[in-house]
Amino acid sequence: MISSSRLIEKVLLIRPFGFEGQMRLKDCYNFHDFRRMAKRRLPSPIFNYIDGAADDEVTYRRNTAAFEGCDLVPNVLRGVGDVDMSVTVMGQRLAMPVYCSPTALQRLFHHQGERAVAAAAAKFGTMFGVSSLGTVSLEEARRICDGPQVYQFYFHKDRGLNREMMARAKQAGIEVMMLTVDSITGGNRERDKRTGFAIPFKLNLAGITQFAIKPSWAVNYVRHEPFRLPQLENHVDMGRGAMSISRYFTEMLDPSMSWDDVAEMVQHWGGQFCLKGVISVEDAKRAVEIGCTGIVLSNHGGRQLDGSRTAFDQLDEIVQAVGDRIDVMMDGGVQRGTHVLKALSLGAKAVGLGRYYLFPLAAAGQAGVERALELMRVEIERGMKLMGCSSVDELTKENLRFR
């Protein structure tokens, strides 16, 4: 198999460098604009890795549609002047009620990767996270941003590896541990199968052709430092085809992970511990029982179990059950400030963003992420004023009506 760098070099020989369509960052005003800009810049296999989901992508579509079945009921003449949109979640003070959810492989989308996200999060005073499959080390990300940061990791068959990862995070100054619990095996992502997308690259002819017609991405790729997975490189050999991402999920992760296993980790960590991927009320209650301080209602952006319930549809039920004992967050399908207001009104302490910042990252690096967060900040502030709310605490279920 051809190495990643050799593959990209061959791609550059197929077609000389050129422009793939002009679209300026300042012309992006919403999620859809950023998505179009990213699509113009990225080779199709990488764009579809971000954009795609499992099976028929039903859950992916429903994640955003769920917000559309709920209407805001604004109040007027409330004397709203200054707006305080700050929140405290898992002991972390955020200047705005959204955060950048940890995601994998970010330097594949843009050479700045997690560095751009860390710097943007620091500028806006919000939280971000580094993944076990992150392309920048925990330590470097911590140096860039000393604000709220989580480490998102997976549960491995090697229990010693799990403990080592937690020890490394604590030494780096990470205050919140986030364990992903909905990915004991990889989802059926058929878009990736059609292009042959994998890490290391193992593209089919159609995939290679798509890289050839988007050469600016390839130029950036070969001009910057080699692609790495720093959190795993001492434990998993990702070079020369020894271990692919798909094999990592099927061979390294432990599908037998149980509540007892997680309870032991919570005690070992001894601090803020969050489960990402909770959907049922029963699981939310168990998270409280074992000492977790936070849960993220999530279906992994529709990338795991297609047909599963959306986080927004489950939010009210779970907040009613455990919201007074644990910090409840959610992610999935969030594209607008009004989506955030609806989630906060149902009791979410904060809302995670995924593709919302990944597309602008892919399109323009740090400048893209900063523009996306600024647009979201403005939308939330404007929405709160129009709702007659001066602070997040004033958003309640009375502001909503479901169709």
Image (cartoon, grey):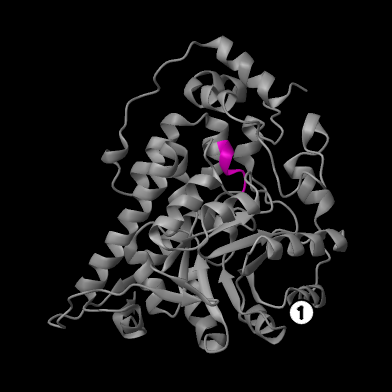
Q: Residues within 10 Å of mark 1 (few under 14, many from 20)?
A: few
Q: Which image quadrant for residue 339? A: bottom left
Is there any visible trace of residue 43 in the rendered image? Answer: yes
The answer to whether residue 108 is above or below residue 294 is: above
Q: Residue at x 65, y 49 (%)?
A: 137
The N terminus - image quarter: top right
Of residues 383 and 195, the one nearer the viewer is 383
Q: Residue at x 25, y 77 (%)?
A: 73
Q: How many marks?
A: 1
Q: Residue 190: image x %, image y %?
A: 63, 41
Region in magenta: 103-108
Q: Residue at x 57, y 86 (%)?
A: 322
- Looking at the picture, which amino acid does disc 1 mark? Gln
Q: Which image quadrant for residue 291? A: bottom right
287 within the magenta span: no
Q: Residue 326: image x %, image y %?
A: 57, 83
